[in-house]
Amino acid sequence: MLKNPCKQKSIFIFLLTLFCGFSIVAQDLSDINLANEYYTMGELEKAKEIYEKLSKNSRNIALIHKNYFEILLSTNDFKSAEKYIDKNIRDFPDNVFYVVDKGIIYGRQGELKKENEYYDKLINEIGGDERKLRLTAQYFIRNQKLEYAVQSYEAGRLVQKDPYLYAVELATVYRLLNEKDKMVREYLNFVNRSPNNLPYVKNVLQNFLTEEEDLGSFENMMYDLIQKEPENEVYAELIIWVNIQQRNFYGAFLQARAYDLKTGKDGNKILEVGMIALENKDYDSALDIFDYLTKHYKQAYIYPIAKRYKINSREELVKNTFPVDVKEIRILANDYAQLVHELGINSRTAEALLSKARLHAFYLDEQDSAIEILNTIISIPRVSPELQARCKLDLGDIYLLSGEHWESALLYAQVEKSRKETPIGYEAKLRSAKLSYFKGDFVLAQEHLDVLKEATTREISNDAIHLSLLIKDNVGLDTSDFLMRKYANIELMLFQNKKLEALDSLNRMFQEYKGARLTDEILWLQSKIYMEMGEFEKAIQLLEIILSDYPDDIFGDDAFFRIAEIYDYHLKDIEKSKELYQEFLKKYPGSVFAAEARKRFRTLRGDYVN
């Protein structure tokens, strides 16, 4: 059968064309790589020559544009740049980047009026095309032309008749411009349009409003807005939020109360503020808040919660007023008993029973009563598994108080096994580590701690890291095992509330081993005991030794802050504590205590009026 010569010729021509095309592409890629290499090495003229040849083929533009355009601008070859960009605009009419680039040429030449007129026209043309507008604005941002990005988004709002459009995008640009008030207003636009995004906006503002002045400005803005729009729940929420950020919990309560009265809510927001105040150790504010709730919401579902937290707030006040008054502890235990009598033994009163058990165990030296209460909680129907686990941990602590280490270890292990990969499970592991530490088994303690440093909550992680560093710093050196065992045994005495015995041992240890690596830890524990015994002057003297001899060690900022707190809460010396808080903020601005120091300084100065 004869072959068709015409068909064969056509195939040959197609293959030849395809081969040549591949050769051209391969050659272009090779040239692009060479030009890029020259560009990287700073040999711009060599790179420019190659890019210029490559630019004649529109297929290469996307691969060479960034470098080639920058070379033309940096070498002031504006004529070639404009010719190159005009060609790109003709070849790629839908690509807004090349259109923006033409304006960049005017700007680089210093023709600012021409640049401005050009961009004004461009922005007016694309205002109604959302896709082009977004691309153009993003390209402006990429080229540091932020004001034109703002102009683009605002033109889009105007043309599309939506005053809230592009709010997040505009907020981002204003953040880059460091115009925080305008940034905030755009986030408010965003959340007013979509109130469900309020948690997101709070998180964003928390990250960017980090300075005291920023929060103050935001607070003033919120007060102005709420006066104009008193029914706006977003503004009401944000006024409460900013007071909490400033640690002005009583101020947050006043706003939450006003919001609640205005909207007829159920007091839940007030309860939330009270719980935050309690968590942040503002016991006076917390007590006022829960007292208000128990008086005004007797028929509401939050009543038993508020009543328990009211007792709990007073408990924290009593426990942090040194020396602790045992009579007050007894009154608190009776208050919890009355609450349980009023509401019955059930899942709603289980937390109150747990607090009562802890008072009996750790303050009244009535371990048997505590054990009985804890076992009662564990047997309550529908009590949460987490609460049962907490009760078991407390049982473990009570057995540790009486020296029954084996029973403690079993209970900790039970909770750790049953509540794996949960905060309460990690807490159980931490207590196992501390038990090993108390017993002098530092290797086993370290094994537990190594796991906890990575896989848990910040509080547990911090405790684990602190204990781990203490062990590593003081185990493995000459005689340090021996000293570490003595020190760990003293910490066990303190856990068992044997303050005088522990203090006597610390005093002897300090005299015998003065200058040892554990000296600052010894001083810290001594000061803690004296403070809890109400001997504040002695506590201050020891803390001042830490500041003079170990200012940069782990207890440096702790010691300074504690001295300020002693003058503030216990000696009631307002002027001295103000002075110390202010000095603390200058010396330790990055401390974890900085926020609280700032809040206390402002409170003592009279910034917050209840």
Image (spheres, grey):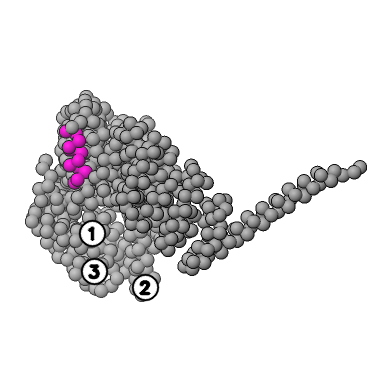
Residue 194: x and y in percent read 33, 33
Please tell me which of labels 1 and 3 falls first in the chain. 3
225 inside magenta stretch: yes
- Label 1 or label 3, whichever lies nearer to me, is 1
Q: Name the one closer to the observer, 380 or 147.
A: 147
Mark 2 is surrounded, within 10 Å at the Cα level, by few (under 14), some (14 to 19) or many (20 or more) other residues, namely few
The stretch of residues the image draws in magenta is 216-227
Three-letter code for the amino acid on which mark 1 is drawn: Pro
Quadrant of the image containing the N terminus: top right
Q: Which mark is residue 589?
A: 1
Q: Name the one closer to the observer, 64 or 503.
A: 64
Please tell me which of labels 1 and 2 falls first in the chain. 2
Three-letter code for the amino acid on which mark 3 is drawn: Tyr
Please tell me which of labels 3 and 2 falls first in the chain. 2
370 inside magenta stretch: no
Residue at label 2? 477
Say if residue 399 shows up in the picture.
no
Q: Main secondary structure of the magenta part?
A: helix
